[in-house]
Structure formats: C-alpha cells, structure tokens
Amino acid sequence: MKYYKILGLFLMLALLSTACVTKSKYKELSNLYQKCSEDFNYTLSEKNELVEKNEKLTMELLTLKDKISQLKEDTTAVGRRLRIAERNLSKAKNDYDELLRSFSDQNLNKKAEVEMLMNSLEARQKELEEKETKLAELQHILDQKDAEVKALRNKVADALTGFTDKGLSIYEKNGKVYVSLDEKLLFASGSWEIDSKGKEALGELGKVLANDHDINVVIEGHTDNVPYRGSGNVKDNWDLSVMRATAVVKELLKNKDILPQRISASGRSEYISVDAEDSREARSKNRRTEIILTPQLDELFKIIDSQ
C-alpha cells in the first residue's frame, strides 16, 4: 500500500508539472502508473490465494495428526491385549508343568484326570490361538477399510474440486466420508428444487458412486431453527428437510449406474446443528445437505459375529 501511495504522489507531481512535461512523457507516466496498479492488484490476489491454500493445508495436517494419534492408541491397545494373552498362555503352561510334577508320584488312577487336564489346557491354548488369528484378521480388515475410506475421500475430492469454494466441503468421521453442501449451492431459500450449480456438483459425485458399488449412501437434509411456514404437504422444517434430501436422491439416481438399493434419505430438520449460536452466520452453516458415504462392512461383521 505504501508503494501504491508513492506511485500516486509521483503521478500528482507529474500532473503539477505538466507545463514542463510533454504530452508523450505524461502518457508514459500514466501508463507506468496503470501497469504498477495492475501488478499490485495481481500480487495481492496471489497472496490471498496462498494464504487460503496454507489454511487448508494446515487443517488437513491437523486431521492427519489426529488420525495418526488414533492409530497409535489402537496399536497400543492391541499390543496390550496380546501381552495379556501371552501372559495367560505362559501361566497356563506353567500350571500344566506344575500339574505334571504334582501328579507324577500319584496313583496310576490319576492318569485319566491328568489327561483330562491336558486336553483342557490344549483346548484353551487352541481357543487363544483362534482368537489371536481372528484379532489379526479384524485388524487387517480395519486397516483395509481405512485405506478404502481415504481412497474414496480422495476420489470424491478430485471429482468435486471445482466446488470447494462454492459451499462444498469434504471430511472423514467415524470411518465415513461426509460431503456437506451449503444451501446456497443446491437450493433457493425455502425451496427444494435443485439449481444448476447443485445439479452439476451432484452429477460429478454420481460418476464416482457409479464406479463403486460397495459404497452405501445416506442423504441427510438439515435446516436452521427459523420456523418454515409452508402450505400443502410441506408445512415445517421437518417436511422441508425431507423434501430436500429426497430431491438429492432423485438427482443422483439420474445416473442409471447407481443402484437405488444403496441410497437412503432422511430429514433431520433443525436438530443436528453444526453451530449452536443464534446468529445469521450460524443459521447459514446449519442449512445444509450432507451426503454420507460408507464402505460395506460385511466381512467385518462376519468376524465379529463369529466371536
């Protein structure tokens, strides 16, 4: 800004001295001022873009750190369970050896009892080994699903990169990918008809979902806490949130490669807000539609049911 003022002062001096400066010199100075102004505005725009990118990268770094911390905690917990299992196994073996020594001098009639105890210990050891194997399988599937969620988030982010500055955000939570769309990207105020920008964004998301049939999709409509005064079948915020969720489902299903069985819609009205403040900004944040993508967990459930 200081540089900008100097240029302005320079031009003013040039104007005051026009009696001694030729028209060509005046035009040259004027052009120079114009170019410097354009360069300044361009540099300022680049600076703002870099600041925005830096903030986004900082948020992504914090998210990754949280996930690394969670993985460390999970690994520590698994290690703790394994150490407990090893101690139990060692104790069982020691008990077994002690029993052998105790019964070595007993009557031969005790042999059957010893054999029974041996079988019991072997069964316990086998059971422990089976549980350790299932635990390893479970951890493998969890790691696999976590990788699938990350890959899905990346695919969705790549497909919707042109909408991230237009009211769309993507994040992971509890092993799911959330695509959150502000009201302004999809609907006019109080309406459930999707506008052209929203249709374009949903079309790009539909391409991703059409290529991955192992993803379940839940559409949730959310409103603010301002009462909706409607008529006909749409009378309040509950009705409005349901209609908006249903409208998104129907728009996605225009892609014939998406199976309707994979999608469900629900209206949450005003009761799951992202900002509890009673302000215009908070209400704007709360008026949103969330598309929740969940990988199928059939393998995981089978292992848990077999425990």
Image: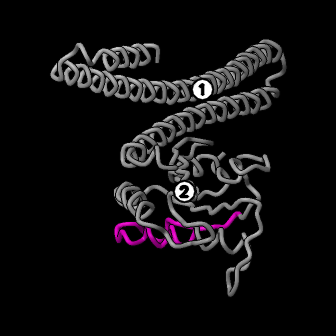
Badge 1 marks a residue whose secondary structure is: helix
The front one of 121 and 174 is 174
Q: Which residue is mark 2?
A: 291
- Asked whether the viewer can see residue 297, the reply is no
What's the amino acid at mark 2?
Ile
The front one of 131 and 38 is 38
Q: Which residue is mark 1?
A: 71
Residue span colored magenta: 245-268
Question: Is the residue 224 above or below the residue 295 in the image?
Answer: below
> Does the magenta run of residues contain 61?
no
Where residue 183 sits in the image (x, y, percent)?
Answer: 57, 59
The front one of 37 and 29 is 29
Badge 2 marks a residue whose secondary structure is: strand
**In the image, which is nearer the foreground, mark 2 or mark 1?**
2
> Does the magenta run of residues contain 256?
yes
Q: Quadrant of the C terminus?
A: top right
